[in-house]
Structures are given as structure tokens and as C-alpha cells.
Amino acid sequence: MSHPVDPVDVKCRPTPKGIEGRTRVAVVGAGSWGTAFARHLALRGISTTLLSRRSDHAHLMTVQRRNPEYLRTVALPPSLRIDTYNAFDFSQSNLVVLAIPSRAYAATVESLRPRLAHGVGILSLTKGLEPGTLRRLSVVLEEGMEGLSPRVAVLSGPNHAEEVSLDMPTATVVASRDIQFACELQELVSDERFRAYVNTDLVGVEIAASVKNVIALATGAADGLGFGDNTRAALMTRGLAEMARLGCAVGADQATFSGLAGMGDLVATCTSRHSRNRLAGELLAKGHSPGEIELQMGMVAEGLTAAPAVWGLARDLGCDMPITENVVALIYEGKEIRQAVQDLMGRRPKAE
């Protein structure tokens, strides 16, 4: 098993001066996170185009200089270009950013492949596992782009789009097996508002991003039942243990889970009023179905897709993940929420 580079041993070679001026970015996905991230890059002076699937949506953003469906009050900078995904020419883009739902990931990668140049850089903002195959999304990306030799990285951490779009101080992780690519992206995205750290543990960062959304469903459900801080803290702490257990089983570095991509993102997702997964859990506790929840929220809660994938991977590996197991039973197997609470609290006593 290969091990990620120890953070203290990571040495970034100096990035070329003026990297911002030479990078041309296409952000695929004009939801909350794609919009906030594209805005951030444009304000950094980076040539950036935000791509929507729908021409009417792209037209309204171009005319109004706002996204009428997400982050509606946030102005888009004049330098940010808007276009449609199908019409855009990717040949001039040397960095493609994917900010799309996990369930659309494989299809998007397949449609992108013939439109990208060899060796293009790809930065994924999407969190989750591929439904059905249980593959990490970087694996979906690398296998789908076979022959193009793309440089692949993921960006993850406690990064709520609502706060990034308001220029609130934020820290994140850029993970890649290609440490120099991670360092170049770190230089590209970092400023006084947005601080990026590099990590070579791509596996750990992606597992953390998947599991934390499932645990957020559980904490949201506890909120929906009117439980308090003790319950939330217990779910988050034991959820972190589940995250690390699964991650280490697939070769991740334990240290990743105490960092921004692990504990940091878990805290933000389980406690924030901006967290769509926490809200989805709250609505689950009140009897709403997954379909009703997404319709009511008007946004995708990735935990609803991630939960069965995470549990499927854990089951295949023999990992004990009782919170995840009960979340899946609650959503997809008709388990009563009070019974799930009773089953979790009534488990056989054990050492921490």
C-alpha cells in the first residue's frame, strides 16, 4: 500500500510567476458552489467562464450579473464570463473545474472527454461516491479521461458557498497525487480571503467528503427531533470515527481526518445553517421523503446519494459504521427514526 507524503515533507517547487494570467478556467456547474468559486477566481484576475447546462439560465446570469437561482443577492464581477456547457469551446481552457452533482458525474465526464486537450488540468469540487459502482469520483474522472493524461486534483473542506461568496475568511484543501499540480492550484486559488493547503492523500480527502454528508443527515435528524448539543456532539465524534475507519480501510492517512477535509468539513456541515445535508436530515425526521426534500430545498443534498454508496463500501470492507447503517435504513428501508435512535443507543457497550 502506498502512503501519502507527510505534510512536513511536502515541498512545492516555485510556481511560475504570473500563473493567474496564464490560466484559463472553465467552471462546469452553475449551482451555489460553482458560482461562488467562479466568482472567487474572477476576482483574483483569472480568466474564468461559468457554464450552465441551460441557455435560459446562462442568459439571465449574463443580463442580470447575478445567479437568479442560487446566491441570488451576490453580484457577479464584470470579468466573469457566462456561457452554456454545450456551446462552449474547451480547447482554450487549461483548467476545468467540475462543480456538479455526484449522480451526474460519470455522464459529464463522458461528454467532456472528446472536448478536452491532452494533459488538461481538472479540479473537482464534487463530494461523494459514484452510486452503484462505489468508485471515488477521482477514479471515475481518471478512468473516464483515459488517454488524455489529465492532471487531477480535488478541493474539499469547510467551504460553504454562501460564505465564500461574501468573502468571509475560508480555508480549504487541494489534494492530488501530483504534488506540484496541487501546489500550482494552491497558488492559483489562495488570497487573503481564501487559504488553501495541499495534501497528497486523495483517497482520504474524498472519503471524508463523502462520509461527512451522511453524518450531517444524522445530526440534522437529531435537530429535527429536538435533541440537543450532547446528541449532536456524540454523533459528530462517533461519525468522525466511522469516517476514519472507512478511510483507513481503503488506504487513507489517519491524519487527514483530523484536518480541514475531515473534522473541519464535518463540523461545518453538521452545525451550519447553510448546510443542505443538515437541513435534509431535519426534514427526514419530520417525515419527508428524499424526493420531497430536494423539491422543497431546490438543491441537491449529496448525503442522500452518498449514504447508500458509503454504506455499500463499508459493508463490502467489513467496516462497522452504525450511524451510516441507520441513516440508510431510515431513508431507504422505512425504519422509524425513534427505532434508529434506540438501536444506536442500545448497542453493546464497548471501549472508545
Image (cartoon, rainbow, N blue to C red):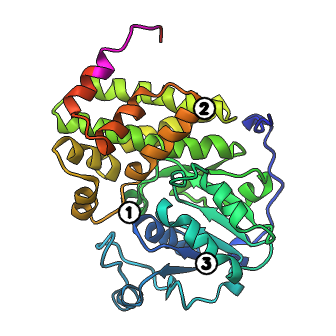
| Quadrant that contains the N terminus | top right
Pick whichever, 138 or 327, lies toward us: 327
Which residue in the structure is indicated by mark 3? 111
Kind of residue at badge 2? Leu
- Circle 3 SS class: helix
Q: Position of residue 230 (x, y in %)?
A: 27, 22
The mark closer to the camera, 2 or 3, is 2
Which residue in the structure is indicated by mark 2? 317
Kindly identify the residue that appears in the image at 53 percent across and 38 percent down.
262
Q: What secondary structure do most residues of the magenta stretch adopt?
A: loop
Q: Compared with residue 23, is residue 122 higher up or lower down, i.e. above or below?
A: above
- Magenta extent: 343-350
Mark 3 or mark 1, which has the lower sequence index? Answer: 3
| 19 is within the stretch colored magenta | no
Distance (Cα) linking label 3 and label 1: 33 Å
**How many discs mark residues in the rendered view?**
3
Kind of residue at badge 3? Ser
Q: Compared with residue 65, is residue 45 higher up or lower down, i.e. above or below?
A: above
Do the numbered discs 3 and 1 sit on residues whose CB atoms are within 8 Å? Answer: no
Kindly identify the residue that appears in the image at 73 percent across and 37 percent down.
7
Q: Position of residue 33 (x, y in %)?
A: 44, 64
Which residue in the structure is indicated by mark 1? 166
Kind of residue at badge 1? Leu
- Circle 1 SS class: loop
